[in-house]
Amino acid sequence: MDWDQLDLSPRISAAVTKGNLKSAQNVLTFSVPELQKLTQLSVADVRLLQKTVANALRKNEMVTAFQMFSEKTQFPSQHQKLSLGCKILDNLLRGGIPLVGITEIAGESSAGKTQIALQLCLSVQYPAEYGGLGAGAVYICTEDAFPSKRLHQLIKCQQKLRSSVPPDIIKKIQFGDGIFIEHAADIEMLTDCITKKVPILLLRGAVRLIVIDSIAALFRCEFAARDAVLKAKHVQTLGAKLHELSSRFRTPVLCINQITDTVGDSVQDNLGLKDRKGSPALGISWSNQLLVRMIVTRTPYAAPQECPGCILRTMEVVFAPHIPQSSCYYTVDVDGVKGIDQPLSQ
């Protein structure tokens, strides 16, 4: 940086030129007494010179966390979320799934976990102005075959489900080509997929969402109860790698988890759950890896008249750094997953 680019008085500029300081960067390599000797300036003038140079060379100004939170227009990327494709569910999650971190959806069989994951795989392909990330998704199956028939059904219903998006935008998106499917039969295959295959897709910009369905299946098969310590180490290693990918590529990681039965009437509060029979699998070692945990439940009740023939389900935010414990109803029909604007009694 040249001296003429700095806002210095002619007197100080002349002094530094006479002192044979060739560039502004040189100023920060000398102490105050050394600069005084070279420039014959006072202590106050030397400190003013140092401050002016430091401000000019500083590339990024300091920003507080509160500024990033409150000034959304200046920091849009910090507030960006991946939409679930439903305004009501997005409102529950304060905009959708966070881009950095692991989000878990846990629930019993037929609660709608995979349906939500499939809908997110389609939602991520929309442009950012419609809640997407403009890229595809990688879907890693660890137990059941990928539900390709249901995916094609959801693709055909996108114009109906996403009525707020212009039809020409939806027609341009090749949804089926944007989902990369992998099957992992054991933990070694899962690790290989996450450490070798997924990073290639992320580097190419082909995907911006990682889905694992389900995270617990392989650990349940390969580890007995006596192997708890070894299982915890594998869980932590896997979680660390997923965090690394998510942070590096600003890519949401969605993990489907199962509910395990618990001895007694209810689980303790150490997992963020109260008065609930059963708890998400993999225990506290996995819970510590999560940014957001949601529990989905299938109720025995029928949905309201706007969704005839559907079963009422609930989505509950158990813990998240930016959301209080809250919940809402939702349904799953031919078109997809839809929230119901009716609060649950707490």
Image (spheres, rainbow, N blue to C red):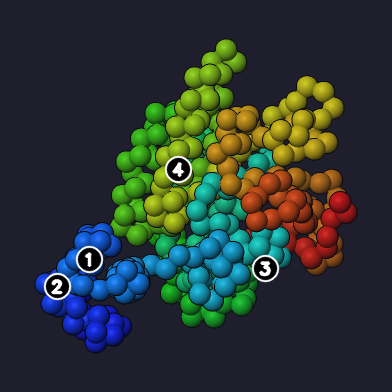
Q: Residue 180: horizontal and vertical position, in percent?
A: 41, 51
Mark 2 or 3, closer to the camera: 2
Residue lying farthest to the right in this orientation: 345
First-in-chain label (4 vs 2): 2
Kindly identify the residue that appears in the image at 77 percent across and 30 percent down.
267
Quadrant location of residue 9? bottom left
User: Circle 2 is placed at which residue position?
Assistant: 19
Using the numbered discs, state the Cα–Cα distance from disc 2 to disc 3 in whole angstroms. 65 Å
Mark 4 or 2, closer to the camera: 2
Using the numbered discs, state the Cα–Cα distance from disc 1 to disc 3 in whole angstroms. 62 Å
Q: Residue 290: horizontal and vertical position, in percent?
A: 58, 42
Q: Residue 72: horizontal and vertical position, in percent?
A: 56, 72
User: Circle 1 is placed at which residue position?
Assistant: 35
Residue lying farthest to the top in this orientation: 226
Local SS, label 2? loop
First-in-chain label (2 vs 3): 2
Using the numbered discs, state the Cα–Cα distance from disc 4 to disc 2 in whole angstroms. 54 Å
Q: Specify whether residue 219 is in view.
A: yes
Q: Which mark is residue 87?
A: 3
Using the numbered discs, state the Cα–Cα distance from disc 1 to disc 4 in whole angstroms. 50 Å
Residues at marks 1 and 2 touching, judged by CB atoms closer than 8 Å: yes
Residues at marks 1 and 4 touching, judged by CB atoms closer than 8 Å: no
User: Circle 4 is placed at which residue position?
Assistant: 242
User: What amino acid is labelled 3 in the image?
Assistant: Lys
Mark 1 or 4, closer to the camera: 1
Q: Nearer the viewer, residue 196 or 75?
A: 75
Kindly identify the residue that appears in the image at 52 percent across and 23 percent down.
231
Whether residue 131 sits left or right of residue 276 in the image: it is left
